[in-house]
Image: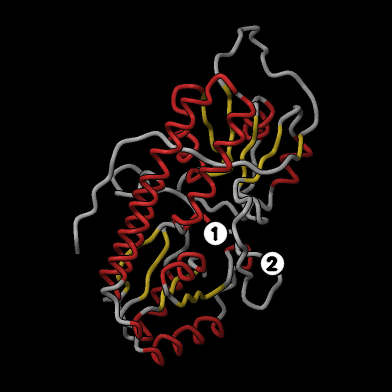
Amino acid sequence: MKKWFKQTVGAGLLLAGGLTLAACGTEESGEEREGLEITTSFSVLGNIIEEVIGDRGEVEYIVPIGEEPHEYEPVPSDFRKVSDADVFYINGMDLEEWLERVVSNAAADTDIVELSSGVEPIPLQGSDEADPHGWLSPKNGIMYVENLLQDLIERDPDGEEYYRENAEAYIGELEELDAWIEEEVAEIPEENRLIVVSENAFKYFGADYGFDTEGVWEINSHEEGTPQQINRVIDLVQDRGVSAVFVESTVDKRYMTQVSDNAGVPIAGEVYTDALGAEGSGAETYIDMLHHNASTFVDGLK
């Protein structure tokens, strides 16, 4: 596999429209804040925002690394994070199913901005609902960056030049990564281009880079892992003759272990979907996570 080079840079994210939370002040200490205070739903978006905002603001995210954001149960400190923020960035596409609880419990005039605005939705199998995992393709990640950039400039016009510089550099990184993935996946034979995980989260990646995707279930909030679901995937893996399956960092690995054992194919590695990796994982940033996923797929399927 060819070496992939990464630059150090700041980045840009995205905008969307405007829910607003309900009302209350944020500065109990009486101290004047410097820069924007931003809260976002989960670690992937947090990293993208940090790259763009740089030292002109502070970023917190709600769902801890290692947990999945679909059915997260907010705690009282989460409501405070949102109410103290200038803006609450979410993915949208119904990823944050707990959003209504935050809105009803937080008290602040905090804008809620969807960062997936402009992503062409791919429906969940057997449903009209959109799959929310748009960020798993860097092509969509560029839209996230462009939209965030627009929103940050509206909120902090004095920082426009700084935000644009960070966003342009970060988009350059994502474009470089996109080109690298295109080149690397060309090594995988067409007949092997099937990504099988517990949650069928890689639809956007698959559409952009020529893979079919399957999961034991469609989305983690629909998680069941029934014998019927597992047997269906076992049959599919054997019928397609794929060389490997994969596990996700935020999902119980027992389901794919059953698939692997019964289909007679190895688990080729762990991939990251709903959260960044912990320190030392090699997937601590959004770009590193995408690079890790693509490398794992190529190594397992070529």
Report which residue position mark 2 lands on: 129
Whether residue 158 is situated above or below residue 94 in the rendered picture? above
- Separation of disc 1 and disc 2 at Cα? 12 Å
Q: Is disc 1 surrounded by few (<14), some (14 to 19) or many (20+) residues within 10 Å?
A: many
Looking at the rendered image, the quarter that the C terminus falls into is: bottom left
Q: What residue do we see at 48% from left, 83% from top?
A: 233
Image quadrant where one finds the N terminus: bottom left
- Reading the image, the residue beneath label 1 is 133
Residue 274: x %, y % from top left: 50, 54
Q: Which residue is at the far left?
A: 2
For residue 267, side relative to residue 200 (left or right): left
Q: In this view, does 92 lie above or below 166?
A: below
Q: Position of residue 33 (x, y in %)?
A: 58, 13
Binning the other alpha carbons within 10 Å of mark 2 as few (below 14), some (14 to 19) or many (20 upward) gives: few
Q: Residue at x 29, y 73 (%)?
A: 186
- State the image coordinates of residue 138 (x, y, percent, origin top left): 44, 55
